[in-house]
């Protein structure tokens, strides 16, 4: 007789199982990028407001963002934005009924991860290395 009772898994087992699934990885990263955006968007909006307030404000923001640490923080914020946007597009496409099967979901998750990796690498070159 097969038992349908839930099984308590250790956290290590749950993490091990989820790291094998591109769908789970894409979902976890989408949630983490959303949390990241919740915390960094006020700072990004403040920087935008300062840069648009006056020529002196623009110069101050330029000076602030000229350091390596500031560039890395900006890169992380924009990388979260890029990934969250692309994963959101994947969800919108799925809402239209495309890729709703298990294999379609895996394919879209892999595509989202690959396209995001290329976009974030290009963002790194643009923000940090320039």
Image (spheres, rainbow, N blue to C red):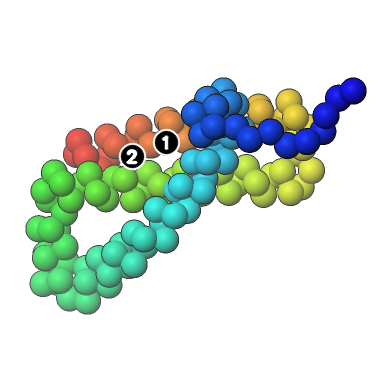
Badge 1 marks a residue whose secondary structure is helix
How would you rate the neighbour count of disc 1 (Cα within 10 Å): few for under 14, some for 14-19, many for 20 or more?
some
Residue at 39% x, 53% y: name it.
36
In the depicted structure, whether residue 25 falls above or below residue 89: above
Q: Quadrant of the C terminus?
A: top left
Residue at 75% x, 29% y: name it.
102
Badge 2 marks a residue whose secondary structure is helix
Q: Is residue 48 visible?
A: no
Residue at 22% x, 44% y: name it.
72
> Which residue occupies the foreground of this view, 50 or 32?
32
In screen coordinates, is 42 left or right of 14? Answer: left
Residue 23 location, quadrant: top right
Give the residue pinned by disc 2.
Answer: 123
Q: Position of residue 116 (x, y in %)?
A: 47, 35
Q: Position of residue 1 (x, y in %)?
A: 90, 23
Q: Position of residue 34 (x, y in %)?
A: 47, 53
Circles 2 and 1, Cβ within 8 Å, touching? The answer is yes
How would you rate the neighbour count of disc 2 (Cα within 10 Å): few for under 14, some for 14-19, many for 20 or more?
some
In this view, the residue farthest toward the right is: 1
In this view, the residue farthest toward the front is: 1
Q: Is residue 87 visible?
A: yes
> Which residue occupies the foreground of this view, 120 or 11?
11
Q: Position of residue 126 (x, y in %)?
A: 27, 39
Give the residue pinned by disc 1.
Answer: 119
In this view, the residue farthest toward the bottom is: 53
In screen coordinates, is 50 left or right of 116? Answer: left
């Amino acid at each position: 007789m097969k038992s349908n009772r839930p099984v308590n898994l250790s956290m290590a087992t749950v993490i091990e199982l989820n790291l094998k699934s591109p769908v789970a990885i894409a979902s976890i990263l989408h949630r983490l990028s959303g949390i990241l955006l919740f915390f960094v968007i006020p700072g990004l909006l403040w920087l935008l407001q300062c840069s648009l307030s006056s020529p002196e404000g623009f110069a101050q923001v330029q000076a602030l963002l000229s350091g390596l640490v500031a560039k890395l923080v900006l890169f992380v914020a924009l990388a979260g934005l890029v990934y969250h946007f692309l994963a959101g597009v994947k969800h919108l496409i799925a809402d239209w009924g495309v890729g709703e099967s298990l294999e379609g979901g895996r394919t879209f998750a892999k595509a989202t991860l690959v396209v995001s990796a290329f976009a974030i690498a290009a963002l790194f070159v643009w923000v940090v290395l320039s």
